[in-house]
Image: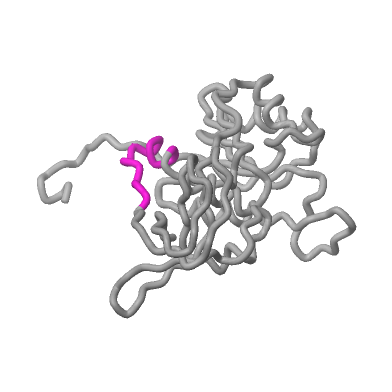
Amino acid sequence: LLAAVGLCDVSVIRRLKVAFFSTGDELMAIGQPLASGQLYDSNRYTLHALLQDACFYSTDLGVIGDNPELLENLLTHSAEQYDVIISTGGASVGDADHIQQVLTRCGEVNFWKIAIKPGKPLAFGKIGACYFFGLPGNPVAVIATFQQVVTPALQQLCGRQPTRPWRFNATSLHSLKKTAGRLEFQRGILSQTDNGDFEVRPAGAQGSHLLGAFSQANCYIVLSADCHGITAGEQVTVEPF
């Protein structure tokens, strides 16, 4: 198109350089035997897949143990090389969760904790000119917060108009439990009847650590913050993926 109108020079926005890593002494590489209290690090593979976009270069920085000095050193040096850093784990309030405190020391925290489920312990800030997203450690929360928070932010940084999620109504085939207070993204299985109506049912248990149940889902059931639960037969908002 540019050649067709005779243009040889145009202004562009370069591809973002995005780095990501996991935190936690309990994380083990796949293929290694697990001892009591250990987990396989699946989150880095998830982020690698989610970052497959023509507008990004992504770099895997590996796993960082629960050591605030090592974490601060990694963030400080990586912020000089990358436009965006994404971590998983360490953003909650446990003794081994250091993201918020370390980010305060080496940069700035713009917000910490958001009213969504799954994904409440999410930190966002800057280290110099580098943007930082500290995602939760549970794998379903990683996916949900990346899709709902990180994706539109990266699109904006790339100079693209953030894509609005496609949402519409469907009939819930089951009652859904929910406590008011947070916007909730329950995982569901969406289907269409012979007459064209959409129906949805929950995709098994809704724990944010249950990646297997998430793999059966094809949509989010989006429940507003003021929702106190859904009875079977009610209309709900769904967001296919």
From the image, give the main secondary structure of the stretch colored magenta. Answer: loop
View extreme (bottom): residue: 194
In magenta segment, residue 205: no
Asked if residue 157 lies in the magenta stretch, the reply is: yes
Q: Nearer the viewer, residue 63 or 147?
A: 147
Find residue 194 and report its horizontal and vertical position in percent.
32, 80
Q: Residue shown at 59%/48% (left/top)?
A: 142
Q: What residue is drawn where x is 35% and y is 42%?
A: 162
Q: Nearer the viewer, residue 130 or 4?
A: 130
Residue 90 to residue 184: above or below: above
Magenta part of the chain: 153-165
Residue depicted at 45% across the width and 63% down the height: 172
**Residue depicted at x 77% and y 44%:** 24
Above or below: residue 175 compared with residue 159: below
* Left or right relative to 10: residue 112: right
Residue 48, position in %: x, y? Answer: 57, 53
Place of residue 78 in the rendered image (x, y in percent of width and height, measured from the top left): 62, 33
| Picture layout, residue 66 above or below residue 144 | above
The image quadrant where one finds the C terminus is bottom left
Q: Would residue 65 appear left or right of 233 to someone viewing this image?
A: right
Dividing the picture into quadrants, the one containing residue 66 is: top right
